[in-house]
Amino acid sequence: MENRRVKMSKRLLKESLIELLNEKNLDKISITEVCVKADLNRSTFYQNYIDIIELYEDIEEDFLFNVPKYNRDSTTIELKEQYTKFISYLIKNKLLFNAIVKNSSIVDTLATISSNTQKDQVLGLFASPGFLAVLHKWINGELAMKEAEIVDYIVKIADALNKI
């Protein structure tokens, strides 16, 4: 079990990497940059992580663990509630979402989260890039729509895909 000091160090390292990921790509970020931004020593970094990739994977794992889940067998009303929760989570974690979309294979991961069959996986792989692109543009102010409008569009598309 991690003590408070370790938890705080990991949180600071994660927050620092997320901020840096919004400025540049993962492969351009050094451990030193993360440590300077976190105001921690490199030795603290190495006590918790092997390299930047491991830290990034920890961030991505946290994101996937905390993101509200989607059940494709839901009714339209349930889908609306699920997508509203999902979008609210993304809004609260905008920097994290932007960093992950920019630097990750999150599309493959999201596509397979609720894929029970090959059909579900194909539909997920087909829909996930568009879903993420729309949300990414909207969260960053590039689509002038209200949250309820975005949710309605996504639910309609999900409903149509579920009928395939």
Image: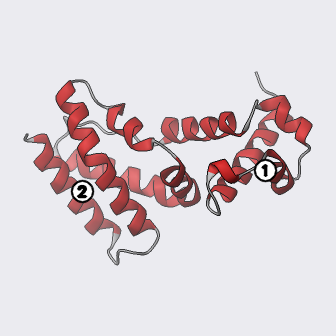
Q: Earlier in the sequence, mark 2 or mark 1?
A: 1
Q: Quadrant of the N terminus?
A: top right
Q: What percent of the width, then of the height, locates residue 113?
A: 36, 32
**In which quadrant is the C terminus drawn?**
top left
* Amino acid tagged 1: Val
Q: Which residue is mark 2?
A: 154
Estimate the x, y position of residue 56 in percent, counting from the top left.
63, 41
Residue at mark 2 to residue at mark 1: CA–CA distance = 36 Å
As displayed, is residue 80 above or below residue 62?
below
Which residue reaches farthest left?
Answer: 163
Q: Residue furthest front?
A: 28
Colour logic: secondary structure
**Residue for point 85% across, 29% down:** 47
Labels in figure, total: 2
Q: Residue at x 53, y 42 (%)?
A: 63
Residue nearest the observer in this picture, 145 or 79: 145
Q: Is residue 106 above or below residue 94?
A: above
Q: Quadrant of residue 116?
A: top left
The numbered disc on residue 34 is: 1
Secondary element at image label 1 = helix
Q: What element does badge 2 sit on? A: helix
Residue type, label 2: Ile
